[in-house]
């Protein structure tokens, strides 16, 4: 080796030796009073915004983080901030210390598997940043802490007259965290003030005994970033608030986020589970309501507005009042009919010809003599078509000429005169014609009342002819 290389190697060895000696001293110091961690030594990492890792805790930057405090130099309070965004763990330190030393350090120690052992394990790690902004990482080899390559995390520090600050960004892969799984880590915070002393959280923790460290968890956040307390927005596109002429109506909906469950309630009945858009089948006639519900992946339930709609498959009932089933003597006949509901279209067919649109009652004009038929059609507002019964009727405008009245008068006059003459002559005959008996002896005519002949006195017999 060259003299320069030997010098650099010697310097590196001295640095490593110094670090190991420092760690050894810390182990000895902390082992004297170390006890198991208590249930109150817990850091809850909340979901929050992503901070800028520049070593400076700006106003408002960590306001959405959880905080933990512990005593440091001269009885002042160090504040530790913790939050996550579903991808990385962020930790910030605000450390009061008016005595500057570039070797002052801020350390986070993790028990990744949370095995809570009384001795160091290979899953344990030590992440350090100094007041002078130097970073170091240690892992466990042969039962002790040894330096290793800094990977999957970064940190920055900044120093002011009366305090210094640091910020960490540690990837989930470094800590074997999966978003959505509520993993718990063992954790210890260490502030090394080289001018005076060391300070740790939990207060009785030992850097060589994970069982004495506290817990770091995300609780109900499950390392998913912001805790989602907002229910999904559920909207119904179909059915609409209108009347349908079919009994199978599509249920079309939208949800603004990923869901774990969707269901709907028809007419206030219990929820029916669906996977998405569906069709409500065999709906009865009348008014219906539908409401859709959806749970997001964190259990927040969203509820849509209730939609009112109507099913109407019954066509309009049409009754024709005129024409009737009879004969009309005019070529214009009123077409009058009744409907029981609102319509969108009305028409009629005369003699099975093409339909003629109308708006209501009308008049059939120009009808020719002969037989006719009429049917009225009507669509309701949802397209159901009603059809009236077919009505048959006749037109006869060619009536016979009336018999002349003068002929009737003459006939009646002649008949009257004849009857009078008949009566007259009958009466005359009765008063002037007499009946006679002829004498069988002398042939003399005798009155009917005579029994003997006035001429010869002969007996007039019964049955004698009369004249």
Image (cartoon, grey):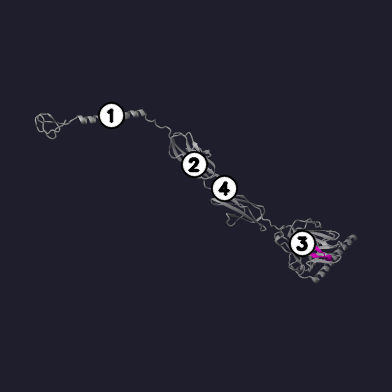
Residue labelled with disc 4 = 243
Residue appearing at x 41%, y 32% in the figure: 399
Q: Name the residue under label 2.
A: 337
* Residue occupied by mark 1: 418
- Marks 2 and 1 sit apart, C-alpha to C-alpha, by 60 Å
Residue 147 visible: no
Q: What's the CA distance linking mark 2 and mark 3? A: 82 Å
Residue that appears at 78% across and 62% down: 80
Q: What element carries label 3?
A: strand
* Residue at image mark 3: 67
Helix, strand or loop at label 1? It is helix
Q: Earlier in the sequence, mark 4 or mark 3?
A: 3
Question: Is 450 placed above or below 314 here?
Answer: above
Per the picture, the main secondary structure of the magenta-coloured stretch is strand
Estimate the x, y position of residue 207 in percent, counting from the top left. 79, 67
Sooner in the amino-acid sequence: mark 4 or mark 2 = 4
Residue 68 image point, x, y percent: 77, 63
């Amino acid at each position: 080796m060259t003299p320069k290389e030997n010098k650099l190697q010697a310097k590196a060895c001295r640095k490593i030796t110094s670090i190991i000696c420092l760690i050894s001293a810390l182990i000895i110091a902390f082992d004297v009073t170390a006890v198991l961690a208590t249930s109150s030594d817990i850091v809850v990492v909340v979901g929050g915004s992503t901070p800028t890792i520049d070593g400076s805790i700006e106003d408002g930057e960590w306001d959405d983080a959880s905080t933990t405090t512990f005593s440091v130099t001269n009885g002042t309070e160090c504040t530790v901030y913790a939050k996550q965004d579903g991808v990385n763990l962020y930790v910030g330190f605000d450390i009061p210390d008016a005595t500057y030393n570039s070797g002052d350090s801020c350390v986070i120690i993790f028990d990744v598997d949370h095995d809570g052992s009384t001795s160091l394990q290979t899953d344990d790690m030590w992440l350090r940043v100094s007041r002078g902004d130097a970073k170091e990482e240690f892992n466990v080899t042969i039962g002790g802490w040894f330096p290793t390559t800094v990977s999957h995390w970064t940190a920055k520090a900044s120093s002011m007259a009366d305090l210094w600050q640091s910020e960490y960004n540690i990837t989930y892969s470094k800590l074997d965290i999966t978003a959505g799984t509520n993993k718990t880590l063992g954790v210890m915070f260490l502030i090394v003030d080289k001018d005076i002393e060391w300070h740790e959280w939990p207060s009785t923790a030992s850097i060589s005994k994970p069982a004495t460290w506290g817990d770091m968890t995300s609780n109900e956040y499950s390392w998913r970033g912001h805790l989602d307390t907002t229910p999904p927005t559920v909207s119904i596109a179909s059915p609409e608030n209108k009347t349908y002429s079919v009994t199978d109506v599509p249920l079309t909906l939208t949800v603004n986020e990923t869901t774990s469950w969707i269901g709907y309630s028809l007419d206030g009945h219990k929820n029916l589970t669906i996977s998405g858009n569906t069709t409500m089948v065999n709906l009865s006639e009348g008014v219906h309501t539908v409401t859709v519900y959806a749970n997001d992946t964190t259990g927040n339930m969203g509820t849509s507005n209730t939609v009112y709609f109507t099913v109407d498959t019954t066509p309009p009932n049409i009754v024709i009042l005129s024409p009737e089933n009879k004969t009309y003597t005019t070529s214009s006949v009123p077409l009058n009919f009744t409907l029981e509901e609102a319509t969108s279209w009305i028409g009629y067919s005369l003699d099975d010809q093409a339909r003629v649109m109308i708006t209501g009652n009308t008049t059939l004009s120009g009808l020719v003599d002969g037989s006719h038929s009429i049917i009225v059609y009507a669509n309701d507002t949802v397209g159901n078509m009603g059809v009236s019964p077919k009505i048959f009727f006749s037109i006869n405008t060619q009536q016979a000429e009336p018999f002349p009245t003068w002929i009737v008068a003459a006939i009646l006059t002649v008949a009257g005169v004849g009857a009078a003459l008949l009566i007259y002559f009958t009466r005359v005959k009765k008063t002037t014609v007499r009946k006679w008996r002829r004498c069988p002896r002398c042939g003399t005519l005798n009155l009917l009342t005579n029994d003997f002949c006035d001429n010869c006195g002969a007996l007039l017999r019964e049955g004698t002819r009369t004249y």
